[in-house]
Image: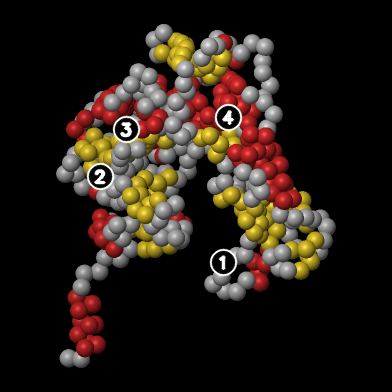
């Protein structure tokens, strides 16, 4: 037998467990289960139809950052995604230990499970953790029941949120990942991929049950025959969750206007002229269209254009200019040429040079109808969202005051669940490294302490 025939015989006898691969979720749309691999530069979507194929994916991609991807409106398990940085936990009054945080989370989850599905067995609780010295991080689910669809999972999350202590209810702490058409969940035994360092960190580990399998911690695993819970509590709250979704995720017209002004300034500093700038569309929310209105020189093509259009891509807090002609002329396999757009002056310098915000005759912090508190301001820092200067200054003036006596006195507004609003005072303001992303600076972060100084001292 020749070496080639021996190899062929070996391959034909070897067990074959196929799975599918694509660069977009729709590339594997025919598959029952989808897994996203974040460890590769162009994220891969891997498709499977049964347990064996899922295990084959995990085996072949061991050590990669894998996420269960949900984009179909079928029954799935409820999931709570909980994250609170230690520096945020340190600001909560009264103080909470790590155990008290987890106990509060479990209690809230159990209460809602039993309210919507009285037959639910608490022994089917599934808890996974990727906590470390810098943050508490848990995923809580159950393999004892399912909910009808993604929307009901989002409702479930909001019901659990309301059962938690007020200080743990922030959107930056309880991330309602199901509050959208599709979402993904970090898989058990998989590390997180840090895009900044390119390293794999914080493997997701089981907490309960300790000996549970991967499929106990998936939210739509194969062969899942647990009962689907149908409760009027879920249906009645759906409208409220939709309103929450609009509030948290949609960009307001005022914010778009501010961002448009920023992009126009970026084009001006880069000496890019001759275009009319348009808002992004719903289909392409990160693309600003540039329609040519006069002829001008294009540094990407190194020639003057008379009728070629262009576009700008937003990538988190940065922007890049692209020309359609340059895209067409690039060689096969090359990246599209672009010009990075950035302001010459840093956010810190611009913030320091801004005039002080308008001071009111009656300080906002004394307004009994203003329910905004110090914890809400901290949540603005940790949410990852972008805010306008006006929003930030209003929030600060609602929660912080400064009095210069023999010694400086800082006043912060808080809320007690039983006794309502109250104030705390101290000679020092401890802020760790909190920052807020400012729309006018293209989402660049500014230290909260500097913003507070601008709003209440300058």
Q: Are marks 3 and 4 in contact (CB under 8 Å)?
A: no
**Residue 229, numbered label:** 3
Q: Which residue sits at x=42%, y=39%?
A: 177
The answer to whether 340 is drawn above or below residue 302 in the figure is: above
**Residue 304, numbered label:** none
In this orientation, which residue lies closer to the viewer: 1 or 260?
260
Whole-angstrom CA distance, mark 3 to mark 4, is 47 Å
**Residue 205, numbered label:** 2
In this orientation, which residue lies closer to the viewer: 286 or 153?
286
Q: Are marks 1 and 4 in contact (CB under 8 Å)?
A: no
On the image, which quarter does residue 57 sit in? bottom left
Q: Nearer the viewer, mark 1 or mark 4?
A: 4
Image location of residue 258, percent across then percent down = 68, 38
Q: Who comes first in sequence, dot 3 or dot 4?
A: 3
Q: Are marks 3 and 1 in contact (CB under 8 Å)?
A: no
Secondary structure state at the residue bearing disc 4:
helix
Asked if residue 78 can be seen in this view, the reply is no
Identify the residue under disc 1. Answer: 335
Q: Which residue sits at x=25%, y=55%?
A: 51
Asked if residue 219 can be seen in this view, the reply is yes
Whole-angstrom CA distance, mark 2 to mark 4, is 39 Å
């Amino acid at each position: 037998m020749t070496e080639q025939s021996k190899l062929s015989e070996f391959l034909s006898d070897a067990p074959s467990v196929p799975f599918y691969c694509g660069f977009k979720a729709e590339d594997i749309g025919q598959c029952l289960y989808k897994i996203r691999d974040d460890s590769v530069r162009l994220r891969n979507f891997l498709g499977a139809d049964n347990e064996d194929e899922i295990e084959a994916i995990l085996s072949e991609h061991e050590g990669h950052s894998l996420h269960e991807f949900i984009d179909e409106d079928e029954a799935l398990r409820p999931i709570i995604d909980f994250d609170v940085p230690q520096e945020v936990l340190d600001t909560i009054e009264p103080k909470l230990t790590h155990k008290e945080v987890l106990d509060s989370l479990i209690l809230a989850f159990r209460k809602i499970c039993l309210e919507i599905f009285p037959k639910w067995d608490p022994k089917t609780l599934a808890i996974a953790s990727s906590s470390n010295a810098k943050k508490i991080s848990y995923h809580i689910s159950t393999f004892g029941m399912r909910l009808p669809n993604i929307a009901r999972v989002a409702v479930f999350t909001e019901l659990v949120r309301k059962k938690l202590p007020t200080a743990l209810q922030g959107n930056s702490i309880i991330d309602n990942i199901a509050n959208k058409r599709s979402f993904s969940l970090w898989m058990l035994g998989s590390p997180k991929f840090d895009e900044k360092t390119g390293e794999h960190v914080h493997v997701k580990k089981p907490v309960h049950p300790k000996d549970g399998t991967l499929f106990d911690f998936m939210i739509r695993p194969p062969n899942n025959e647990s009962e689907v819970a149908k409760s009027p509590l879920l249906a009645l709250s759906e409208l409220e969750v939709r309103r929450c979704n609009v509030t948290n995720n949609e960009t307001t017209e005022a914010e778009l206007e501010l961002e448009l002004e920023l992009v126009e300034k970026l084009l001006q500093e880069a000496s890019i002229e001759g275009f009319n700038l348009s808002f992004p569309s719903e289909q392409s929310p990160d693309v600003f269209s540039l329609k040519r209105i006069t002829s001008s020189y294009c540094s990407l093509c190194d020639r003057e254009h008379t009728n070629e259009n262009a576009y700008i891509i937003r990538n988190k807090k940065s922007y890049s200019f692209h020309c359609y002609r340059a895209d067409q002329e690039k060689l096969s396999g090359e990246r599209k040429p672009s010009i990075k757009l950035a302001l010459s002056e840093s956010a810190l310098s611009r913030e320091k040079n801004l005039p002080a915000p308008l001071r009111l005759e009656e300080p906002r912090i004394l307004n009994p109808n203003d329910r905004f508190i110090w914890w809400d301001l901290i949540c603005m820092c940790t949410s990852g969202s972008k805010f306008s200067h006006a929003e930030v200054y209003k929030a600060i003036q609602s929660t912080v005051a400064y009095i210069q006596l023999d010694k400086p006195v800082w006043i912060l507004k808080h809320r007690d669940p039983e006794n309502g609003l109250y104030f705390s005072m101290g000679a020092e303001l401890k802020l760790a490294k909190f920052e807020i992303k400012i729309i006018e600076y293209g989402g660049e972060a500014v230290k909260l302490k500097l913003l507070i100084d601008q709003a209440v001292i300058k």
